Image: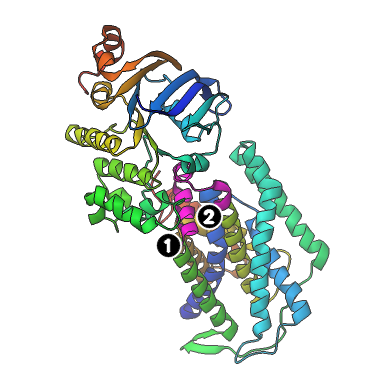
Amino acid sequence: MIGQAIADGILTGAIIALGAIGVSFTLQIMRFANFAHSELLTWGAYLALVFTAFAGPGTPTGPFSFGWQLLAAAAFAALMTGLVAWAVDHLVFRTLRRRGAHPLTMVFAAFGAALVMRNVVVLIWGHGSHYYTRELQMSVELLPGVRMLPDQIFILALALVVVVCLHGFLTYSRTGMAMRAMAESPPLAQVCGVEVDAVVRWTWIISGALAALAGVFAGLTPQLHPEIGFNLLLALFAAAILGGTGSLAGAVIGGLLVGLAENLSLLFISAGYKTAMPFLVLLLVLLVRPQGLFGERA
Amino acid sequence: MSALLLTATDVVAGYAGGLPVVHGVSVDVASREIVTLIGPNGAGKSTFLKTIAGLIAPESGRVELGGREITALPAHRVVASGIGYVPQTGNVFTTLTIHENLKVGGHTVRGELAARLERAYALFPVLAEKRRQLARALSGGQRQMLAIARALMTEPQLVLLDEPTAGLAPQVVGDVFRLLRRLAESGVAILMVEQNAKAALHVSDRGYVLAEGRNRVAGRAADLLTNPAVAEAFLGGKRARA
């Protein structure tokens, strides 16, 4: 029982983590709470659906329910969602930023952008559920009493690869270093010659791409619906704030902890209350350790 | 006096949405010169430096570096034009290592970054020993050294320093001023704001006294130190710190 809850929690947590990284970056680098971030997950999931609608999900390869086409679809969705995120910034947030808008204005603008983005998805694909693939697959017993679908194991492995690559990018690349510099102090980064607009562009593209992967993974286990991102919104913010904003490790560990909290709570409370867990985590963090696990005390 | 490097004329500037803090300040710096701005709190000295560095867009006035106009360029382009800036607080990235701080400092340097890093470590051996540590682990004096080393990564013609000795232990203050003297001799001009006015003027070639956002007195540093009006109004209260 508890082993299975931990396995499920890690899977949910990995998906939350990929979304939370973007929330954390926007909070730290653009200094506002982007409540439209969850819609990037939804857009990513549906953009991958567009790709599979043309290419098909592929013939199941090995134990998985999909073929290489779904991987290509995920890569396509990541790229396109990165561009969508950047476009939304150009249309909405950048204009407000340049006017020196109040952070609260940005939050309301983000809510507005989220509504529009979500309803565009409803308009095109309707309220119903969609599937990348309807192939059945057999779960694998990893440990006694702990079973996972091969697709889920694949998601975990790919999420790990993505996080390791991102860590490498942030640690060693010129742009990654500029992003970390900007996250700590925009004026100091600027006087080092870092161009704010370039860092902002990269931040949106990376955040959007990660959100798209989270959306595709959520859609793969097992279906897509227009609220797929919105339902994770609170979890994304809980994870980003729990981890302490601006730190990659923080967002990843925050995501895993929120995922674990959701799934472990099922052992004690009914499933109907599961979605309240991120909210509870968020409240606890804000009361006990508002700077997050890895954040600096202000 | 050698050729003028920086000429700032009638600069008016302030923070967004507020009234101007700097009401028409003019300052010149020649190459290899150390120039200090002194004056009471709120005189607009730091705001003036931030305006030159491109962090604040001036409302009017003109800034030239080596004959090229740089007025109102954004900060990242001011850096590229040859000016380094060391703010008073938050002047190093505490979440980055010393090595990373220097690399970000050389963000605009393509190709010869490795050579610049070696030069920085040669100039500041204490940083070389700690290159893998986070900058937050450094002492106040070491942070100031890192901040200056970081600003030098682009090989600027002029370095702006906002209160480089604020909060430092007295023996370290001497180290910082000696370092600035050495830099000027190596060909880098320096424009600094200092509360530690007497000590700063001792290492400076010239000085400007600002008050209420305007030029008050200007002259050779040695003359300002002996000017009774300046001494009484702006140097007297600082005796304990100098």
Looking at this rendering, what residue extends furthest in the front direction?
B2
Residue A5 x, y percent position in the rendering: 51, 76
Q: Are marks 2 and 1 on the same chain?
A: yes
Question: B238 above or below A36?
Answer: above
User: Label 2 neighbourhood size at 10 Å, few (<14), some (14-19), many (20+)?
Assistant: many
Marked residue chain, label 2? A
Query: How many numbered circles does the render carry?
Result: 2
> How is the rendered protein coloured?
rainbow
Magenta stretch bounds: A172-199
Q: Is residue A235 visible?
A: no
Dot label at residue A67: none
Marked residue chain, label 1? A
Looking at this rendering, what residue extends furthest in the left direction?
B171
Helix, strand or loop at mark 1 = helix
Q: Within the magenta stretch, is there residue A123?
A: no
Helix, strand or loop at mark 2 = helix
Mark 2 sits on what residue?
Answer: A25
The majority secondary structure of the magenta stretch comes to: helix
Residue A8 x, y percent position in the rendering: 53, 76
Residue A235 x, y percent position in the rendering: 57, 60
Residue B32 x, y percent position in the rendering: 33, 32
Residues at marks 2 and 1 touching, judged by CB atoms closer than 8 Å: no
Dot label at residue A171: 1
